[in-house]
Image (spheres, helix red, strand yellow):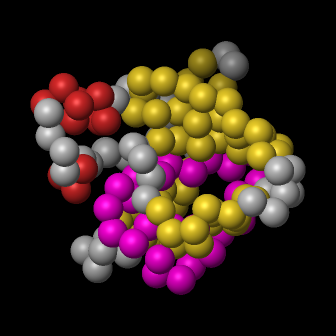
Amino acid sequence: MKIIKLYTGDDNKSHFVEVDTGIESKQPLGNYSKKYPVTGMMFRDFEKGAAFNWHTAPQPQYIIYLEGEVEVEASNGEKRTFKPGDVLFATDLKGQGHITRTLSKGKSIIITTEQLEKLKESGQKDTSSIRCKL
């Protein structure tokens, strides 16, 4: 399965890259990737026409789009439209970040990863050293 990762490059700008989650096992109900550690899950609904100007991800998080369309503009200028079934792994925790625009009414699930919890436990305030392996 392929997902889109949004990350901060060495140029301090956000970039997209397609990532294959791989197959760890094949089961009667399908192919399974390895398990990825997560800390929480939120449900979000959104209205058409909302925009969140330049911002970074608050923590590494997967966004699974269930309904509607959302456009994400990386600070390198590339734009991608996410539709039902798409998965965005937002890890651009520093730099200029990205812009998010809702193109229609919709719903998504946001799943946060444990890297933020590890950061909180260590008392570290600078998120630039957080790296997610995916």
Eyeballing the image, is 97 above or below 132? below
Numbered range of the magenta stretch: 75-99
Q: Is residue 85 magenta?
A: yes
Which residue corresponds to the image point at 40% horizontal and 52% vertical from the top-left? 91
Q: Which residue is at the front of the view, 134 or 26?
A: 134
Give the percent coordinates (x, y) of residue 67: 82, 44
Residue 91, above or below 96? above
85 and 41: which is toward the camera: 41
Identify the residue shown where x is 15% and y is 40%. Answer: 124
Task: State whether residue 106 appears in this view.
Answer: yes
Residue 89 horizontal side relative to residue 29, left or right: left
Number of residue marks? 0
Query: From the viewer's perspective, is 58 left or right of 68?
Result: left
Residue 29 in picture, x, y percent from top left: 69, 19
Give yes or no for residue 89 being in the magenta stretch. yes
The reply, left or right, for residue 30 in relation to residue 55 is right
The residue at 58%/36% (across/down) is: 110
Q: Is residue 19 visible?
A: no
- Residue 71 is drawn in which quadrant? bottom right
Q: Quadrant of residue 107?
A: top right
Name which residue lies at 71% across and 44% down.
65
x and y percentages locating residue 3 in the rendered image: 56, 51
Q: Which residue is at the front of the view, 2 or 92?
A: 92
